[in-house]
Amino acid sequence: MTHQKYLKMASFIPRTAFLASEHIQKSYFLGHHRAGLEKMKAMLDSVDHVIECRDFRVPATSINPLFEEALGGKSRTIVYTKRDLGADSKPESRMKEKLISRWEQKSTKVFFASRSLKNSVTPLAKYIKYLPMAANSVIGYRMLIVGMPNVGKSTLINKLRSMTNIKNVRKSAVVRTGADPGITRKIGTPIKLFEKDDIGIYVYDTPGVFVPYVSNPDSMLKMALCGIIKDSLVPIITLADYLLFQMNQNLLMDMYGAYCAPTNDIMELLGAISRKAGRLVKGGEPDYEAAARLFITQWREGKLGLFMLDDVVKVSWEKKNARLGTTESSIPGTSLELTPERAQKILATGVV
């Protein structure tokens, strides 16, 4: 690092707020989302359990209240996917898992699964094999797997299937996956995952279901960054600017340090990326949109730091206040800042 770049990093002050345009699209509720949700409702009487997937990078934003309304009466397991893209193994990260787990009722089991680590779904697989002990059905134990678009439902099914204990059954992928939302468009036939005491354990893959309306542009930007909605719904440079804002908020300026010194100016960063990566147009001018796509792709692949877009401590605090009927400002001396010491305390006590 040059002396000049070091001085700029030392004096750099990140933006404290992102001014999102009110013109950002506020809906992605498509026809197959509505049809899929209605089909799920119709199937409730014939399934025993629901597995709901949420994206670990946006654990609160990827909660779909439509599932609470439609599937609330059915026993449920929550799986936070892509954990390896949202956190490392430090105490602060483990603390966040503990807080997230406390968002649900004690009767609801919560698991965390990584995209790249097969053994991360082993605890979930063991739990699923235990569930049929309460089943009494000649058609086996049947589950629905639900979630927002592109949160990893099909990938999770393939990982579970690869651990099958069924004899003479191939362990390769059984459902199609992809980086774009909307790969699964309808509920298919049940997929047999395991056998337990001669009872087959089946799962139905379902289409991702978005919410009808998102009033907060910040939430829409988070979901766009995570690929829950199509990239084309948000201007790519706006999306890259929001990613830069989040990286600076998480003090990860060094992750783009190969391109330029810390900056709040997305065009400065994209210009540097264009020149460094050879993303240029005629005349040698920067291709800002190509640079923005590269910047976003690198983050989605975990190459620009591992961090969450939702503030887990803040969400937990808000949920606690809602239970107690209080507000943050009514409790003197409180702070939402997450220090290593506070993380260790929360790990030990589970209290925000």
Image: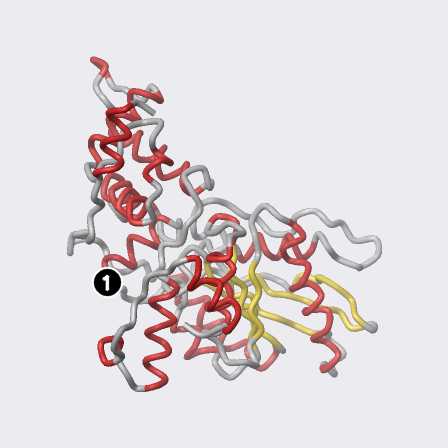
The reply, left or right, for residue 259 in relation to residue 99 is left
x and y, in percent, of residue 170 in the image: 76, 49
Q: How is the image coloured?
A: secondary structure
x and y, in percent, of residue 185 in the image: 48, 57
Residue at the image position 23 percent from the left and 62 percent from the top: 216
Q: In which quadrant will I find the C terminus?
A: bottom left
Count of residue discs: 1
Residue at the image position 36 percent from the left and 59 percent from the top: 310
Mark 1 Cα within 10 Å, few/some/many (few <14, many 20+)?
few
Residue at the image position 71 percent from the left and 61 percent from the top: 193
Looking at the rendered structure, the secondary structure element under dot 1 is loop
- Identify which residue, 216 or 11, lies in the foreground: 11
**Image: 321 above or below 301:** below
The reply, left or right, for residue 59 in relation to residue 88 is left
Residue at the image position 79 percent from the left and 53 percent from the top: 169
Q: Amino acid at mark 1?
A: Asn
The reply, left or right, for residue 116 in relation to residue 254 is right
Furthest toward the bottom, the residue is 325
Q: Which residue, given by chain and number where applicable, does mark 1 sit on?
A: 216
x and y, in percent, of residue 95 in the image: 48, 63
- Identify which residue, 208 or 308, lies in the foreground: 308
Please tell me in which quadrant of the rendered image residue 59 appears: bottom left
Furthest toward the top, the residue is 283
Q: In which quadrant will I find the N terminus?
A: top left
**Image: 146 above or below 258:** below
